[in-house]
Amino acid sequence: MSIQDFYINTTLKRPQSSTGKERDSETGFSYFGARYYDSDILIGWLSVDPMADKYPSLSPYNYCAWNPIRLVDPDGEELVLNDDWVKITGTHEYIWMEDVTNRENTPDGYEYVGANDDDILDDLNIPIEFDTKKTYSKGFNQELSWNCLRIGVSSVNYSEATIRAKPRIEYDKNLNKVFKGVEICAYMTQKSKSIDQKTNSMIYHGGLRVYGNTGLVETAGLKPPTSAIYETGTYPQNASLFIPAIYFRNGNFLMQAKIIAGCSENGGQNETINYSWPLLKNSTIYKK
């Protein structure tokens, strides 16, 4: 028997591949629970990582962030590794450090932060959850009637809004996590009712503003989502802004987020929407 015949006979009869996973009898592929794997192609995986949206800097066809020696992915859901977030003592410079899992094994010169990305927000004294603000506002739209007299058409607008804070995390070339900064996202929905159908087109326009100890830090305009399905007569708008990590390294901190919006279309006069949320989880202290 030649070496080629031996290879073909043994590999085709073997129920398990070199991955340790049993081959599926119908497809001939190795089944890992979340995805099928084909060892005959370079990429291997036949579908994208079900958690690909959580790791945007990596290929959706990766496994264990291309580092199976250091990382483990037992069920296709989360990477398992013995690394946690620390920061250089006395600063807000965050580092994803290998072989650190608690305060006890954190090396000198560093302070333990936590295992989760949101632990950075906690260390920065930034809330993770925010309440939803709601408002009913009244106004009128001025028009020219057939005899050139101005008349007012009353309208009622209902709006609600909330915000969310999240850390922006990316991976470097060595597949280590890097804290890039904090994203503040705003979500506002408006409904308008009027005795005149034309007045329903009167949409509030405005933006998101974030303030810190230095004053106004960043602004972003509210815009309708590029792709969304929503109820007729409902007008959603979103905004997102980014505060880079260096802002916090310089000893600065965030204090407040605001959504300010109004409408004056067709000469109309409507109340201004002004929502605000504190960005200090504990307003009595600030961690430096």
Image (spheres, rainbow, N blue to C red):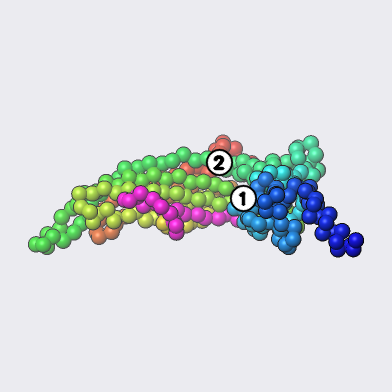
Q: CA distance from mark 1 to mark 2?
A: 28 Å
Residue at figure coordinates x 63%, y 55% from the top left: 48
Q: Secondary structure at mark 2?
A: loop
Residue at figure coordinates x 67%, y 53% from the top left: 27
Q: What residue type is disc 2 on?
A: Pro
Is residue 264 visible in the rendered image? The answer is yes
Q: Nearer the viewer, residue 62 or 266?
A: 62
Q: Nearer the viewer, residue 23 or 127?
A: 23
Q: Residues within 10 Å of mark 1 (few under 14, many from 20)?
A: some
Rendered position, 4 above or below 75: below
Q: Position of residue 72 (x, y in %)?
A: 75, 46
Q: Residues within 10 Å of mark 2 (few under 14, many from 20)?
A: some
Name of the residue lying farthest toward the front:
1
> Quick check: 267 left or right of 121?
left
Residue at figure coordinates x 35%, y 42% from the top left: 135
Q: What residue type is disc 1 on?
A: Pro
The magenta region covers 225-245
Q: Which mark, by number, is residue 127?
A: 2
Which residue is the site of mark 1? 50
Q: Quadrant of the C terminus?
A: top right
